[in-house]
Amino acid sequence: MKHNYHFSINILVVLTLLFFSSQPLLAHFGSRGPFGGSVSVAISNDSTVYVGTFNGGVYESTNSRLTAWRALPVGLRSGRITALIHSGTNLFAGTQDDGVYIYSGVVGTDKHWVRISNGLTNLRVTALVALDANTLIAGTESGGVYKTTDKGANWKFLNSAWLNGTTITGLLKLGNRIIASSREGGVFVTKDGNGWDSFSDGKTLDVGGTNSISYNAKTNELAVINMDGLFILSNASAVTGNINYRTIQPGLPSGTVMRSISNNGDNWFLTTNKGVYTSTTGATWTAANDGLATSDVTVALGFRTTVLLGTRKEGIYTTPASALNWVSRNTNFNNLETYAMESSGERIVVAATEKGIFVSRDLAASYVRANKGLSDSLNVTYLKFYGSSLYASTQNGGVFVSADTGKTWTALNAGLTNLHVKKIYASSNHVYILDDSYGVFQLNGSTWNSIQAGLPANTLLSSMAFYGSKILMGTLGQGVFTREVASGSWTAVNTGLGNLRVTSVATNGSKLFAGTDGAGVFVANLDAANWTPTAATSISHTTLMGLDGSKIQDMAYYAGYIFASYRGGLVASSDNGQTWIAGGNQFNLPSYTSVHKISFVTTRVFVSTEFNSVYSNALSELPAVVTSTKDFNPALNAAIRIVPNPNDGRFAIQLENGNTKVEGVTLFDNMGRRIQDFHNPNDLQNVQTSVQLPVGIYFVQIRTTGGLAVKRVVIR
């Protein structure tokens, strides 16, 4: 008996089945921009410059011209870097909320940070100084100072009437003495940290706002910034009594906030919210802002014959010290706060950041800004391709759509009363949004219509996925719901679901997946009758870095794998969660930042992070997977015909074996991208979808009671 199954095949979503030769996981996740960010601190040691950021960890440059950077994010539980110091042997980092780290951990050829905060009862570190290779002093916020003599393995609180309870804003060496500045009290001195004396005068003692100090060894001067201005102490290393700072009048514009003072021996550099100013003696100051894209400057560092400048949002600049003309140096400095990311096809990557939307058409090698018409471009919450259109949701402006991949945008808000939209999803025929007031809407034509019926009141909606003719909805506290795409109401399907805080849902065409906030991933058949937990979503890297693989943040299916992300990591499973492996070498993924979106182009997986832009790895790094290869039936494959073939996108599947029942059909393009699923093909006749497939070679995967078949289709 012959069975014919007829389809009009059209493209909708981009997922993948790739036929790779098996190979080991080798390549690391790499930074894929866009680049820029905000610098909180900068130091140098020998031939290397290190910069810390307000939320994105630490970077280093070993290039003599400081033209490129390398992130050092692995192992840090906090990316909020407040202090850096190099002892000559080791690099140390102080964080705003998680104590001190040493960059000494080793796994193979990779290095990572190790937390060293035993005895440090105040983890809000504000300053560090190294007395020798083993001895450091740490200043804290409202907690005074601590000392270690064993590279941070143990810390001891240093009792000081001058410093107890104060916020330490600076620590530095001055000859054979250590100088500390406190925000509330002024400047203080010690030989070894065990006893402190005032190093202030009437202009600097008990004056609030003491926020920066700098010692110029060449001129033997100490500069101090407090709320009353800028002050310099001459012959600083020799002074023991009769301390007298001279007042400096830099002549800054009204409203200028002095942020830091530094020097390169020949010149002082004063960073402010209105640019950078320089002076040789402190008597006269000159604005030095040529080449800067912003006046919001945070730190300056003299390095050999170069001066480095850190800014807010615009990243890093350098200039020759002999001629101050700044040049942007942000290559691989991936510290932009990133709110959303989407990719498509072979080369398109789109990122929404604190500086707006950027689009790359060359596999993230370069980006252009793409915000024309997008009135809330600095607050984009989600991005989604639907066909050739790109949709963006925002916090304040609702939804925007672009027909030219971001070159121009148009608002699309008819039917919406709440313009704070959190996420966008798409089925084969519709676009959907979730807003921040528990609402879910479907786009019909150019109007959004609520499809709320059946959901409990005040349900926090987290995610959507689509399978067959149904929608799968995840919620934070109410578990999982389903409904028909065409119409109907939502029905809870939570049997066996051990954690109702569902952060992400996904499907691979034969199974449903629910990622949870604390219980890992659950899997169910397409009827969602019963959920069962998958294997633990933890790998050796997760354990080593102290990450929590049970708190899933996003899920996606591609290349025969279901992917799940969590803070600092990405795992993948080719057997529906029975086992999980690293979704690429995890080194370079920041340990402190959420991995809140997984997306794909033909050959690569992309992930976006909160504070470090976009990372990517080659899909070829994953072991070979052909979905259900173990079930492939050569005899069945030979008994199936596609007619006509070639065709114009409408064809029939002829199955000669009357005892075999078709359970599912999936179409892939010639690059392995999943085009469309048909879950009940015995009931599908002349299926109509919205977009005609382009000419090319495709593959039809047919899942039957007798096994798996894959047939080649030519559309012309």
Image (cartoon, rainbow, N blue to C red):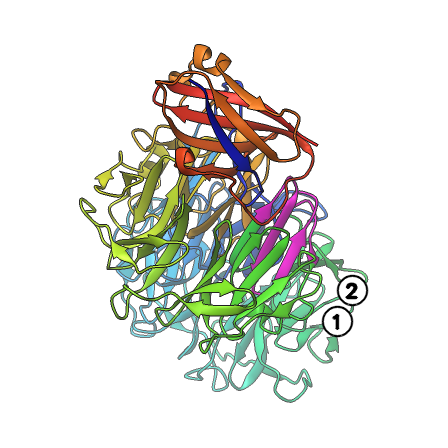
- Residue 627 appears in the figure: no
Disc 2, SS: loop
**Residue 520 got which mark?**
none
**Residue 288 got which mark?**
1
Q: Is residue 688 left or right of residue 475?
A: right
**72 to 351, vertically: above or below:** above
Residue at (61, 53) in percent of width and height: 350
- Residue 450 shown in magenta: no
Q: Position of residue 255 (x, y in %)?
A: 61, 87
| The residue positioned farthest toward the right in the image shown | 323
- Does the residue at mark 1 contact the one at mark 2 (Cβ under 8 Å)? yes
- Residue 177 appears in the figure: yes
- Residue 345 shown in magenta: yes
Q: Is residue 671 left or right of residue 109?
A: right
Q: Quadrant of residue 643?
A: top right
Disc 1, SS: loop
Q: Nearer the viewer, residue 39 or 541?
A: 541
Residues rendered magenta in the picture: 343-368
Q: Position of residue 466 (x, y in %)?
A: 41, 48
**Residue 324 got which mark?**
2
**177 to 135, vertically: above or below:** below
- Amino acid type at image mark 2: Leu
